[in-house]
Image (tube, rainbow, N blue to C red):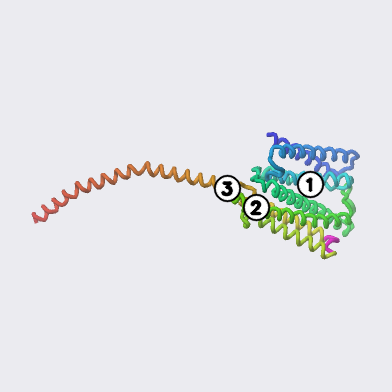
Amino acid sequence: MLSGTSIFCFAASYAVALALEGSRLFFRSSVRGAVLLAFGAAGLLAHTIFLAYRASSEAMPLASEFDWYLVAAWLLAAVYLYLMLHFPRTAVGLFTLPLVLGLIAVAAKFANRQPFPQTRASQFWGTIHGAFLLLGAVAVLVGFVTGVMHLVQSYRLKHKLRAVQGFQLPSLEWLERTNSRATILAALMLAVGFVSGLLLNLVNQAKHPGESVPWTDPVVWSSGMLLVWMLAAALFSLLYRPARQGRKVAYLTVASFVVLVAMLGVQLVAPSVHGQKTKSQHGRVFRNATALAVRWDQRACERRPARILDFGFWILDSAIQNPKSKIQNRDERGAT
């Protein structure tokens, strides 16, 4: 009850801030900036209190998939507040807050709240693994936001469209620079997160075989595909100078966002043992199968005595009837 109410509180604050951002398109207001800052800060404060409560009740930060999505939303909300203070007249919230609310919705409706298995290795390598994957994913989201703003701004300038009242965006130079940096930063963070996850899995295979994850697990190969894409995008941006300019870098960040969403979708939908106590799950399956076999054997034992008695009566009846039938057959042959 407490967690649901807290999630509703900061989600509602972000939703009100998004509505206020949308009102920029319809009317001017001298107090809107202050109200926006108040609702954004209130949402981030409630969000922080909720995450602090979750962290104090768990053995380590990012203890579950649920926490991972909420921390990602918190970081993106913090980026929104920074951009709002840095560019107070721009409508960055129209591009950032929908992602924040989307992450919260995924956490509340789809993410698993079961804590990850905790070992000595997971407390160190697991924290590095989850934290750097989180930072890499947030960098991809920031790149997507600035990429979309870059495409919108360049389209307006290319077609010489008249500026919409209240709908201002940062300069193309700043957006290009931020897009390029976000792509490179995301690739580095995801590389550290993926390698630390491999090391964690190797340690678990050696010391805790029941906690290791198969290399063919959907989480492993989907994360590897995301890393390969981000490394290719970062190298392309570094080695090919025109890729850091114009709409090319924006297209790269948008494509990276699509790959990230696909990876997260696979991890939410596909069956996986990543972050689960595989040993205990196998034990639970074995116990269920054993109980089912015992119940079947009990039912078979209940039916067995009746079948044995029926078989005994059949043998006894056959032994009694067979001599009579032999005598009758002998008499019939003698009479003939």
* Residue 252 or residue 15, whichever sits in front: 252
Q: Which numbered marker is on residue 203?
A: 2
152 to the left or right of 127: right
Q: Position of residue 93 (x, y in %)?
A: 82, 46
Residue 257 pos. (x, y %):
75, 55
**Lower sequence index among marks 2 and 3:** 2
**Horizontal placement of 161 versus 236: left or right?**
right
Q: Amino acid at mark 3?
A: Lys
Binning the other alpha carbons within 10 Å of mark 2 as few (below 14), some (14 to 19) or many (20 upward) gives: some
Question: Crowding at label 3, few (<14), some or many (≥20) Cα neighbours within 10 Å?
Answer: some
* Neighbours of disc 1 within 10 Å: few (<14), some (14-19), many (20+): many
- 36 in magenta: no
Q: Magenta segment, principal secondary structure?
A: helix
Q: How far across and how far down the image is residue 23, in percent?
A: 84, 43
Residue tagged 1:
76
Span shown in magenta: 242-247
In this rendering, the label closer to the viewer, 2 or 3: 2
Q: Earlier in the sequence, mark 1 or mark 2?
A: 1
Circles 1 and 2, Cβ within 8 Å, touching? The answer is no
Q: Which residue is mark 3?
A: 279
Q: Quadrant of residue 41?
A: top right
Nearer to the camera, 79 or 189? 189
Q: Quadrant of residue 220?
A: bottom right
**Element on which disc 2 rests:** helix
What separation in Å lies between label 3 and label 1 (alpha carbons)?
36 Å
